[in-house]
Amino acid sequence: MATVLEAKEGSAMGAQSDLNSLDVDNNGHFGPFGGSYASETLMHALEELTEAYQRWSSDDEFMARFDSDLAHYVGRPSPIYHAERLSEHCGGAKILLKREDLNHTGAHKINNTVGQALLAKYMGKSRVIAETGAGQHGVASATVAARLGQDCVVYMGEVDVHRQAINVFRMRLLGAEVRTVTAGSRTLKDALNEAMRDWVSNIDDTFYIIGTVAGPHPYPTLVRDFNAVVGREARRQMEAQYGTQPDALVACVGGGSNAMGLFHPYIEDRAVKMFGVEAAGHGLETGQHAASLCAGRPGVLHGCRSYIIDDSHGQILHTHSVSAGLDYPGVGPEHAWLKDTGRAQYVSITDDEALDAFHRLTRLEGILPALESSHAVAYGMKLAASMSRDQIVLINLSGRGDKDVHTVAELENISL
Amino acid sequence: MASNRIDVRFAALAEQGRTALIPFMTAGDPHPDWTVAMMHELVASGADLLELGVPFSDPTADGPVIQAASERAIEKGVSLESVFDMVRRFRAEDSETPVILMGYLNPIERLGYADCFAAAADAGVDGMLIVDCPPEEMAQLRPHLDASGLYPICLVAPTTTERRRKLICAAAAGFVYYVSFKGITGANRLDANTLVQPLADLREDTSLPLVVGFGIKDPQGASAVAFAADGVVIGSALVATLADAESEAEALERICAFVAPIRQAMDNTDHPGKQVAS
């Protein structure tokens, strides 16, 4: 039987001639995706942000401060851990975990917020706003705002406020104002709408910390770059610990920031396969999912062209995933381009499969993964099982699952 | 190609020394069956051009009033194609009043640019204001827009830099829509004095009529803006007034009561600040 990797070989090979065009152009286009589909009021702010980012990301002092914060505040580098019992359980490739769950605040989200809040400070903006789904990005934004003395407002859909009550309280403890969004589906997309409205209305003093590799240019590039420390570290650690690079990378994809952070430094390294794992929710066939790349189509949402989930009239549809952080009807435009060029493969994992992986990793390795990351673990386990023992799968364990224990208990009818 | 109704209407207004009143309402709200009659009532009450909002699920540039109206209309099954149908029925009795559709790009993507704009023009639409499609992203759709004879209605904001202002004015047709403040539709903070300089700057870059919108709610606001602009858009305040009308007759009554005093206030305003393009 062909392994999953071999079965995917054809499409991956086909992409290789296109690799030179994989990077972003000056206006934020990744092939036909990306761009700045924003209202006129935002255009100047986006240009200002683009210029500021270009200036400070090539400034030695700024980058030294960013690196220092990642080391001493976030706690980087995050280890690469060999999940021996999980590997044994799957009976195939060696499974390694990139432990982003060990970062300060418990997820990869802090890499980006440290970078953006620092950029806000260098740009002289005194107020930061953010949208959040699972609450991880909101907590990470509130955290850096507290540290830099910035006012912070976090928009969060009413549904998410309920399913992530602990993170709401954490944000409030950190001094952020959490504004509940009751419009539309009352989840991440509506929080993003509301944050954009705030930004349009308070453009002079406000910096919008977008939490994923989506939105108008320059956000997809900027968020990717701040998260790419994950992939750069992984390359060094793999070389030092194993003398080789992984055969496959696996990461969950909602908007896609943790995946892009891991993938980006590997894009040119064509021997390394890349798998983005979307949320299949109750199953792609039920329509209750959040798998934009696997089951959506190209369209325009939240400032960029990418794969989205909409109806035949172009209205954005409500999505479903057990994990709030993946419950989003769009995806970063660079992922759309990696999909269409075949450089990365996108697959999906259902709620049930993710929950199974959640328990499996917890019981076999003593690591409680976030429900988002559990999607990556679930696919990584399948993939590893189809590969040989001398191969390596590196899974980005993007966040820890403490925030999800109430959700899991509720799903299993356990009252705490 | 036949001349665009927008040009014809602004030329006539300039001759009369009047400022255009451009009411906005969300197509299909409060009820899709009433929209055509409401359009006629707007014209009867003094509207010179009509702006119809195409409902979109995620209207990021709009405030809560228009978002709620959009959600109601979508629930009642209103789509871009049904908006075209409303315009077609309006055109059966009114072949002169220009109609502009304001909306977001994704529903247009679904129909395809060529088909969408051809259908819009065929229904009698005159201009498209696509909120989330700045000139930088217009390259692919512009040829289809031009081929159908539709005008791209472009926005200029207080935050727009001189470089972009020139770019936008070069792309615009029909009129230029100046967003009166840094914010979303329906927010309440327009100060008409702040319009004088930006509109004067705009007139350096374009001879097109200048229309001001966002934040104009009543006769006083409209007449203050009419002092400096060639057209005034009133949107959220009208949408809010109509939202809970329980019958078509009630909606029409409310339109007349809301729009007629605004028309009157604008017509009583002198326009020394203007120099309408001839």
Image (cartoon, rainbow, N blue to C red):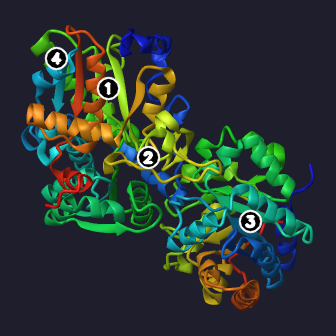
Residue type pointed to by label 1: Phe
For label 3, the SS is: loop
In the foreground, A382 or A279 = A382
Amino acid marked by disc 2: Gly
Q: CA distance from mark 1 to mark 2?
A: 19 Å
Position in image of residue B64 (x %, y %):
50, 72
Instruction: Name the subunit of mark 1.
Output: A
The answer as to whether the residues below labels 4 and 1 share one chain is yes
Identify the image quadrant of residue A334. top left
> How many discs mark residues in the rendered view?
4
Q: Amino acid at mark 4?
A: Met
Q: Which residue is mark 4?
A: A238
Do marks 1 and 2 share a subunit? yes
Calculate the distance from the C-alpha at mark 2 to the C-alpha at mark 3.
33 Å
Q: Is residue A394 left or right of residue A367?
A: right
Q: In this figure, which residue is indicated by the disc labeled 1?
A: A263
Q: In the rendered structure, find residue B209 and report the number of the disc placed on it.
A: 3
Q: Is residue B232 above or below residue A100?
A: below
Q: CA distance from mark 4 to mark 2?
A: 32 Å
Specify the subunit that label 3 lies on.
B
Residue sitting at x 27%, y 47%? A116
N-terminal label among 4 and 1: 4
Give SS at disc 2: loop
Determine if residue A82 is in view: no
